[in-house]
Image: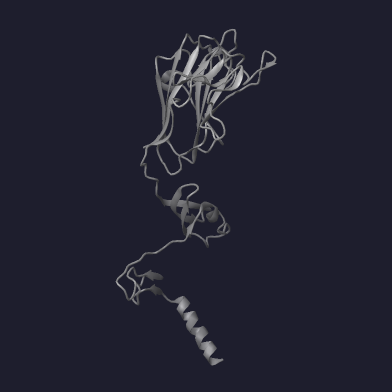
């Protein structure tokens, strides 16, 4: 019985004293001291912080009623989100703070590219066919779709495209949008941009024919114009969270307006770009509208790069 009491007493003293690892000399200001040199060898080591994924971090039962967990530290290393950060818990704000994060080196600056050269002519969709040529299917790089399924009371695929002369197809190494009769949407698959802090998205727009725009016809974000006096425009939207929310680019380089990225005739080739993007996955949406057989909008040379 006496021996048990002595052991318990000694254990209590140890818990209340300063602690040193690999050393017997503890600085007076330290509660815990780690000596880098491993005793008795000449090798050196470091302090390894607990490593967790973001899901594991979210499961840590930090207190939300007092400050007992203020300053709790972990290192988040998550291959699924590419987050690599030293985090400290702030009990005042009840949140994990990024103290230092590492970013992925940009070894190859092209994260996504589409110049439409791998597709045969007349690949895409038309008013007479939902799929022409080697239109991408399955795990697609991009898709084409309409914003409406009814025109003049008749259902047509993909809605505003009525016959073989109405189409969005690859012709001559560019995606050609002809006589769409309403808004048609080009959309990329989600592009992984995790870990990059300055992503650039760029593409080229051009046209043939005479295009028009009538501001008074604008009714909402994409309904603008009727067939008898059609307004022509291009809208560029992007999402950095996989498509949960989108940002629309208005009036690019003064060639659009508050409602559209580009309107009316284009002054030759427009080199469009948006820079400084960051997030998890980038989705690009480009909305086109024109109304006549001799009106064409062209899309080419889409690139997503990291700086």
In the rendering, at what x and y percent does residue 166 appear? Answer: 57, 14
Q: How many marks?
A: 0
**Camera-side residue: 197 or 162?**
162
Coloured how?
A: one colour
Above or below, comparing residue 59 to residue 241 in the picture: below
Whether residue 30 appears in this view of the structure is: no
Report x, y in % for residue 207: 45, 14
Residue at the far right: name it.
Answer: 153
Which quarter of the rendered picture does the N terminus lie within? bottom right
| Name of the residue lying farthest toward the bottom | 2
State whether residue 126 is above or below residue 42: above
Q: Is residue 8 left or right of residue 307?
A: right
- Of the 4 image quadrants, the one containing the C terminus is top left
Asked if residue 100 is positioned above or below residue 168 in the image, the reply reads below
From the top left corner, tell me how far across and down residue 290 is, in percent.
Answer: 54, 14
Q: Nearer the viewer, residue 9 or 189?
A: 189
Q: Is residue 148 visible?
A: yes
């Amino acid at each position: 019985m006496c021996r048990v009491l002595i052991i318990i007493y000694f254990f209590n003293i140890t818990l209340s004293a300063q602690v040193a690892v690999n050393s017997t000399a503890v600085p007076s200001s330290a509660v815990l001291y780690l000596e880098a040199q491993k005793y008795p060898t000449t090798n050196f080591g470091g302090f390894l912080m607990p490593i967790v994924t973001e899901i594991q971090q979210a499961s840590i039962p930090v207190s939300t009623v007092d400050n007992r967990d203020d300053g709790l530290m972990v290192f988040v290393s998550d291959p699924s989100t590419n987050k690599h950060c030293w985090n400290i818990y702030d009990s005042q704000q009840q949140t994990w703070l990024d103290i230092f994060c590492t970013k992925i080196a940009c070894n190859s600056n092209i994260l996504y590219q589409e110049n439409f050269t791998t597709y045969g002519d007349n690949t895409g969709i038309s008013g007479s066919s939902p799929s022409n040529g080697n239109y991408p299917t399955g795990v697609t790089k991009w898709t084409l779709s309409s914003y409406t399924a009814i025109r003049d009371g008749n259902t047509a695929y993909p809605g505003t495209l009525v016959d073989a002369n109405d189409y969005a197809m690859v012709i001559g190494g560019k995606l050609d949008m002809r006589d769409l009769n309403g808004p048609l949407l080009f959309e990329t698959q989600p592009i992984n941009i995790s870990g990059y802090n300055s992503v650039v998205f760029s593409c080229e727009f051009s046209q043939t024919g005479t295009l028009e725009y009538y501001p008074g016809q604008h009714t909402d974000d994409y309904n603008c114009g009727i067939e008898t006096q059609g307004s022509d425009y291009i809208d560029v939207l992007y999402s950095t969270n996989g498509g949960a929310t989108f940002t629309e680019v208005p009036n690019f380089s003064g060639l659009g307006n508050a409602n559209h990225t580009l309107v009316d005739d284009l002054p030759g080739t427009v080199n469009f770009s948006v820079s400084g993007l960051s997030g998890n996955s980038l989705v690009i949406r480009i909305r086109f509208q024109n109304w006549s057989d001799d009106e064409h909008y062209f899309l080419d040379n889409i690139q997503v790069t990291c700086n």
